[in-house]
Amino acid sequence: MQVSKVIVFLPAFNEEESIAEVIENIPRSFAGADKVEVLIIDDGSTDGTVAEAKKAGADHIISFEENRGLGAAVRKGIEECYLMGADVGVMIDADGEYPAWQIPDIVKPILNGEADYTMGSRFMGSIKGMKFHRRMGNYFFTFLQTFLLRKWLYDGQSGMRAFSRNVLQHAEIIHDYNYAQVLTLNLVRKGFRVLEVPIQYRVRTTGTSFISFKKYMTNVVPAVYREMARPVSKVAGEKKSQLRSSENSDNKVTVIKYD
Ligand SMILES: Nc1nc2c(ncn2[C@@H]2O[C@H](COP(=O)(O)OP(=O)(O)OP(=O)(O)O)[C@@H](O)[C@H]2O)c(=O)[nH]1
Ligand SMILES: [Mg+2]
């Protein structure tokens, strides 16, 4: 399938040292996709993240006045991709850990009609520098999702994912701290087809991680429980929505401020 517009969004919080390189490595067109736009969800950064993103050629920047959390940032990215008329939405972390040049690889199964939702899988691909305790944490939370969904997953915490337009319309993220686990639980239970694609990953050398053991236990674990406890209805297979935003004909950066 040939699509007209792919939007790649980057949730970013104080990533001035790495964001430009990620943006520069995003292919601006590739087999099956005519046009690729870049959207930054700046989660209240207090450093030069926004200036660096503009310099590197970001097309759209949405800035939160205050830090809201990664879950809130990804929720906004998904909503905006849909409203801006993306045929396929992609998210990638801004810290340089994920291979932006492999975006076509994770979009391809969606264009081919093989999947609705893809995740770049570090454990199916290659990993440079992941600490032992982080690896254990990843195995644990991935296994938890596998168990709850009765579906084998390799990497449930990936920071590189792609979404069909239908997924962009129906995805729900029920907490602000993180999205990784609850989003997959939500989409698979709605009947969307998930597929993992091997990617090359290297641990960040700049910035700081938002992950804390305590916050994972007090935020992620209860959110996983709440997501599984609430009813969701199957939506996959519905007729795709035709809603499209008007085309942005110039290349100016659009800055929208949210308070
Ligand atoms: N630190 C932090 N990052 C956020 C927040 N909101 C969005 N982000 C962005 O979310 C992405 C993932 O955050 P990371 O802290 O790298 O999380 P991670 O990759 O799971 O953890 P590491 O393996 O330690 O890098 C990065 O692009 C961040 O800039 C937030 O509130 N705090
Ligand atoms: Mg990271």
Image (cartoon, rainbow, N blue to C red):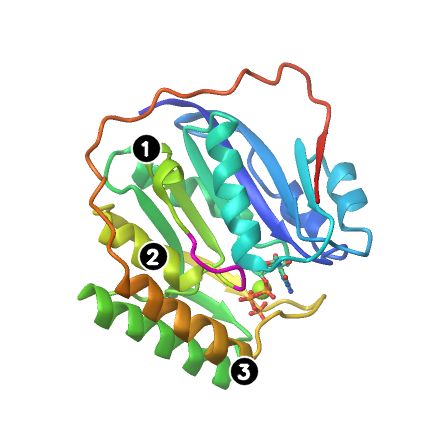
Secondary structure beneath disc 2? helix
Span shown in magenta: 173-177
Secondary structure beneath disc 3? helix
Looking at the picture, which amino acid does disc 3 mark? Answer: Lys
Query: Nearest the camera: 62 or 121?
Result: 62
Looking at the picture, which amino acid does disc 2 mark? Answer: Thr
Secondary structure beneath disc 1? helix
Task: Examine the image and state in which quarter residue 67 appears.
Answer: bottom right
Ligand 2 position by quadrant: bottom right
Query: Nearest the camera: 224 or 10?
Result: 224
Q: Is residue 27 above or below residue 146?
A: above
Mark yes or no: residue 56 visible.
yes
Mark 2 vs mark 3: which is more N-terminal? 2
Residue wearing tag 2: 184
Q: Position of residue 201 (x, y in %)?
A: 51, 63
Query: Nearest the camera: 155 or 50?
Result: 50
Q: Does the beta carbon of the residue at mark 2 sit less than 8 Å from ligand 1? A: no
Tell me which secondary structure the magenta stretch mostly adopts: loop
Q: Position of residue 16 (x, y in %)?
A: 76, 54
In the image, taking residue 207 as reference, residue 125 lies left or right, namely: left
Residue wearing tag 1: 111
Task: Examine the image and state in which quarter residue 204 appears.
Answer: bottom right
The residues bearing labels 2 and 1 have C-alpha atoms spaced at a distance of 20 Å
Q: Position of residue 52 (x, y in %)?
A: 78, 45
Residue wearing tag 3: 214
Mark yes or no: residue 98 visible.
no
The residue drawn where x is 57% and y is 54% is 93
